Amino acid sequence: MLPFQLVRRAVPSRAMQWLTPVLAAALTLVVGLAIFAALGQDPVRAFRVYFVDPISDANGVSELLLKASPLCLIALGLAIGFRANVWNIGAEGQMYLGGVFATGIAIHFQEHWGAWTLPSMILAGAIGGMLWASITAFLRAQLNANEILVSLMLTYVADLLVKYLVFGPWRDPNGNNFPITVQFADDALFPLFASWWEWFEGTRLNASLFITLVAIPLAWVFVKRTFLGFKLAVAGLAPAAARYAGYSEKRAIWVVLLIGGACAGLAGVSEVAGPLGQLNDRWTPGYGFTAIIVAALGRLSPLGIPLAALLMALLYIGGESAQISLQLPRAIALVFQGLLLMFLLGCEVLVNFRLHRRGAALA
Amino acid sequence: MSTGALLRLRGISKTYPTVKALDGVDLAIDPGEIHAVLGENGAGKSTLMKIIYGAVQPDAGEIEWQGAPANVTSPAEARARGIGMVFQHFALFESVTVVENVALALADRMPLKQLAQRVGEVSARYGLPVKPWQYVHDLSVGERQRVEIVRCLLQSPKLLIMDEPTSVLTPQAVDQLFETLRALAAEGTAIIYVSHKLDEIRRLCDRATILRGGKYITEVDPKQTSEGSLAELMIGRTFPHTQRRAHHSGPVALELVELSASGEGPFGTPLRGLNLRLHAGEVLGVAGISGNGQAEFLAALSGESPVADARAVALAGEPIGQLDPGERRQRGLAFVPEERLGRGAVPSMSLAQNALLTGYGQGMVRHGLVDATAATGFAAACIKEYDVRCGGPAAPAQSLSGGNLQKFIVGREIGQRPKVVVLAQPTWGVDVAASALIRQRVIDLAVQGVATLVVSEDLGEILEICDRVVVMAGGRLSPVRDVSATSAEEIGRWMAGGFPADADATPH
């Protein structure tokens, strides 16, 4: 038996609850630098390469926002579900479906719809994500299946669906047999920031960022001010109280999964109609899964999540930069993500519990 | 205090992070005496018992067992010394037999057949009828308690602790238990009897130690002390009384017609054809021991488990059997659940948010947005009107004591001006002063013409506040009686299931 045990604190410190993510980020940084040192790198230089260089120019800032935006959008949607105790971890698949629906419109209708193409794609993407999430909602609400398993497994179905489309019916006939669709026309792409802001000249940052910028205050109002948001919070904190008050559990499951699916679907659109400009068979660096960490790191708060998304995006980009400049393995970015999650959960436990030496008197 | 004490505690103190549970408490138990430990909820009775039983370690103080200093660090050690405890909430495995449950608690192994024989011997000797090979889930609450006592007696304890043993027993079962306890005491076993029921203590106990707010108050001879003075010692001021009033009942407000429902969970009790009429302006009590269909009955009334036949539950003539709790609330049905934290209130949310929980129909939501000012105002009004001791509308529900939270919940439900109020165990675990306030408000409701249904295990409470009473046993309802035309004995018999079958339960 371990010489220590965890004892629940009577009243967890509120200040520490808010400091947890900061503390976790700081610990990640310290351990990360120690790992760099162990790999034979100068920690100071590694720190600069990892965290400073990537965002020291317009291109870096653009890439950071380009990654943070979908992470933030998906995490905002997921957090609403997590608050209600509905664990949708299939945002990745919902995002694929958003991309698929948007692509369908882009490659079939762009010639006829002109300026209406992009708005239709945005709408279709949201619907695609919602449809995919609604399978999970139906199975959980109507058949009481576990939403964690169902949503996760549906992600792999979605992945195969994307592969089928790009290897089969949607493959670009002039694409040398690569599993990619045709390049979208301009009407089917988000306008670049560079087109009206000179500083971003040559970067990939595009107008899809505005979807996220609108979603942040909307999510805040939903969570903090609406009665529906309150009902969902009750469902998460005290399910028996929600039943007693007459808040329908089924409705809650449907609402949060549809919101989560819509956000993920929109993130999918912003990828295919943004930096990619087409659909291919391996287009996501796992945003749907990383967003789960972002939601947790942001304390499920609509104000914390944007900051968490920026941090997580920085870890991604820093990882790439470290690969190039320091010849470090690709896995280094995943190591950082893992460290961050581990420290976050560890700090969370220690905020709510304290270590107590076995045998000593319980104060 | 006599010199040959079996157990002697001196200056016992125990502090939990947020509360000082015990503060310098003394207690002396002689062999063969029945010693009451009397106090309100939160007086420190349970903590003191857990210290004697070794489940909790004191911060300060001395414990002497048979004249020698003793440091009991675990329940196993306490049992080895001869201290047995019967808990208020039984620790039995429902899916195995009585004898298997007994075997699980014994230190030394013994073949089940031999053990069953010993169980039979002990149960015959002390008048505790128990069938060793019966499954625990088939037993009534009284039978389960007997299993717990037999399990303790098999270890021939010198000291037996009974924690609130009668809270779930019928009056007849209480008499039976008292005979057993007196027989045990006559053989020299000391008994600590923890309770807040004054009449029982006066009937049974030789001495009574009174605790209040974690402090030792005094030791008295309960047989020589009136109930009134015991109560004053216990709560520290004059005992509050409820004011009764004449009973004038109006039209039928809530009607049940052949209400049936399946049991909840594997050991639930199905409801079998319940008929009942609740009139405006009356308080109707549903007596009976929990587990006899009360949970299913309450869920069918509140709407948490809607029933298949819409007409089985009618509110002012309108069938509501298939409606959910929110829709029933809109039609004027308010509900105070038995479980306060986690069901009646969200523990981590503020009182204002908990006002919104069910009071959202009182102008707290506009265009889908929460009007926080309205919710806070409603909560503040509840706090003021029901004397809820708390840090204001922003205080989280979990920071309130059980009694204060219950006052808040009752205030929130009544504050919505319902036509029918259903209260489940309204004063269970609530201190005397808060109980009196809640009971008075229930009686006041009837004066205002509201129909009130009180489901309670506490027969004294039902006889105090209700106009009419009905008993629920085995998923059925007994005939309805005017409280003035019945007695505790008759109700007790009915609680054990002995009421005329298929009687017309709606004489009005």
Image: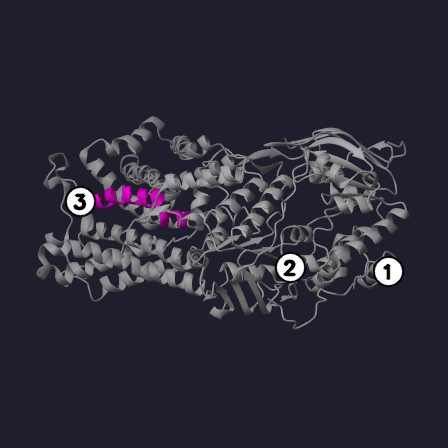
Indicate yes or no whether the magenta region holds residue A226: yes
How far is the residue under mark 2 from the one under mark 3?
70 Å
Which amino acid type is shown beneath numbered disc 3? Ala
Q: Are marks 2 and 1 on the same chain?
A: yes
Q: Residues within 10 Å of mark 1 (few under 14, many from 20)?
A: few
On residue B124, the disc is 1
Q: In the visual, does A250 lie left or right of B46?
A: left
Q: Nearer the viewer, mark 2 or mark 1?
A: 2
* Label 2 vs 1, first from the N-terminus: 1
Q: What SS does tag 1 mark?
A: helix
For the question of whether residue B154 can be seen, the reply is no
Q: Quadrant of the N terminus of chain A?
A: top right
Q: Chain of mark 2?
A: B
Q: Which residue is mark 3?
A: A207
Q: Position of residue B3 (x, y in %)?
A: 89, 31
How far is the residue under mark 2 from the one under mark 1?
36 Å
Q: Is residue A295 above or below residue B484?
A: above
Asked if the residue at tag 3 contacts the one at tag 2, i.e. Cβ–Cβ closer than 8 Å, the answer is no
Which of the 4 image quadrants contains residue B32? top right
Stretch of the chain drawn in magenta: A209-234
Q: Quadrant of the C terminus of chain A?
A: top right
How far is the residue under mark 3 from the one under mark 1?
85 Å
Q: Is residue B120 above or below residue B232?
A: below
Residue at (54, 60) in percent of width and height: B279
Q: What SS does tag 2 mark?
A: strand
Q: Nearer the viewer, mark 2 or mark 3?
A: 2
Which amino acid type is shown beneath numbered disc 1? Ala
Q: Which residue is mark 2?
A: B469
Q: Chain of mark 3?
A: A
Residue at (84, 41) in percent of width and height: B206
**What is the tally of numbered marks visible in this picture?**
3
